[in-house]
Amino acid sequence: MIGLLRLVVFGFVGLSIVYLLVSVYSRSVERERLEKEWDAGGVDQDRDAYIHEGLKRYQHGLRRKLIALVYVIPAVVIAIIVYVVNHQ
């Protein structure tokens, strides 16, 4: 039982670090894309306002929500492995 508790705690900490890194990286990539799009021209808005609005849209977008799968997929895989190993 202690082993399972340790797995859950350390797994959660590890996945939280991965989630944070992926989230920061993805936001950085989106910001860079918006900056390049503005620099290419054709945008009538102020640069900072355009980037701010784009990041606000990103915050509510699908990609941002998919990053949460960092928690779900490993938990499901580990649960399946534990089930298969223990019920063979």
Image: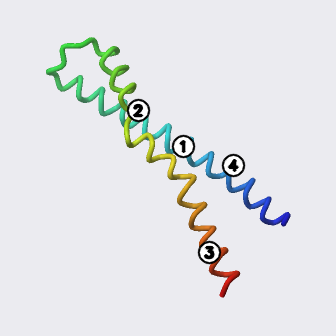
Q: In the image shown, does 70 or 85 lie closer to the viewer?
A: 85
Q: In the image shown, does 35 or 88 lie closer to the viewer?
A: 88
Give how far across and how far down residue 17 sits, in percent: 62, 46
Label 4, label 3: how far apart the Cα atoms are: 20 Å
Under mark 3, the amino acid is Ile
Residue 57's place in the image compared with 88, above or below, is: above
The answer to whether 9 appears left or right of 80 in the picture is right
Residue farthest toward the top in the current orientation of the protein: 46
Tags 4 and 3 touching, CB below 8 Å? no
Question: Which residue matches tag 4?
Answer: 13
Which callout, 4 or 3, points to the residue nearer the camera?
A: 3
Residue 5's place in the image compared with 27, above or below, is: below
Residue 74's place in the image compared with 43, above or below, is: below
Give how far across and how far down residue 59 sits, in percent: 42, 31
Quick one: SS at disc 4? Answer: helix
N-term mark: 4 or 3: 4
Question: Which residue matches tag 2?
Answer: 60
Under mark 2, the amino acid is His
Label 1, label 2: how far apart the Cα atoms are: 19 Å
